[in-house]
Image: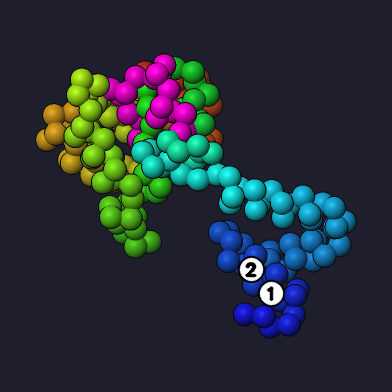
Amino acid sequence: MASGDPLAELVAALQRLPGIGARSAQRLAFHILKTPREEIDGLAAAMLSVKDKVTYCSICSHITEIDPCAYCTSSERDSRVICVVEQPENVAAIEKTHGFRGRYHVLMGAIAPLQGIGPDDLKIKGLLARVGQGLPDQVQEIIVATNPTVEGEATALYLARLLKPLGVRVTRIAMGVPVGGDLDYTDAFTMAKAIEGRREM
Ligand SMILES: [Zn+2]
């Protein structure tokens, strides 16, 4: 797709990024154009480094440089409790509380029919596989920490329906988290309270 117009190609590439419309893409492209070469070298190198070095954990789908990730392999963490979140960045929000010592499972999204995202698009099969194996460290509790949005709630209900028949306890974090909000914007104290006050599903 070499159109021979480097600036137009950059604008087109930027516009494919999430949340970047035509105007923003053009503004960014002109910003890049007038930024010193060394700074752009650094940006390009950081982007390539992420692609080369960071991957997804084959067990929990969290981002990691080593597969499986440190959360999945740590002997310090309780493998009988799994906290389910929508995105890798949500793990950081829960880690900030220093109150959760179990393992994680990242769904890579939430059920959103209007956007064409169904259960098969999420990392649900892997979660079921984790629940169904691993005696004597059998999973006993799944804490569903999807976002308190319509999609997050629908996903939580869907998971509870699938998981409860497997004989595992399914809990939902308490909604001290602002409704319609995102776990990323929740402070550590509120998040700790949300986990502490989790309720049976
Ligand atoms: Zn992992």
Figure quadrant of the N terminus? bottom right
Q: Residues within 10 Å of mark 2 (few under 14, many from 20)?
A: few
| Mark 1 residue element | helix
Tell me the magenta residue range.
69-91
Please state which amino acid type lies under the numbered disc 1: Glu
Q: Residue 67 vs residue 117: left or right?
A: right
| Mark 2 residue element | helix
- State the mark number for residue 13: 2
User: Could you tell me which residue is drawn at 69 percent across and 74 percent down?
Assistant: 9
Instruction: Return the residue at label 1.
Output: 9
- CB atoms at circles 2 and 1 under 8 Å apart? yes
> Whole-percent x and y of residue 166?
14, 34
Q: Is residue 11 visible?
A: yes
Q: Residue furthest bottom?
A: 3
Q: Residue 20 vs residue 36: left or right?
A: left
As drawn, 91 above or below 54: above
User: Could you tell me which residue is drawn at 19 percent across and 34 percent down?
Assistant: 132
Work out whether residue 132 or residue 122 is closer to the camera in this orientation and state it.
Answer: 132
Q: Is 39 colored magenta in this rendering?
A: no
Q: Residue 9 vs residue 104: left or right?
A: right
Figure quadrant of the C terminus? top left
User: Could you tell me which residue is drawn at 58 percent across and 66 percent down?
Assistant: 16
> Whole-percent x and y of residue 11?
69, 70
Q: Is residue 175 visible?
A: no
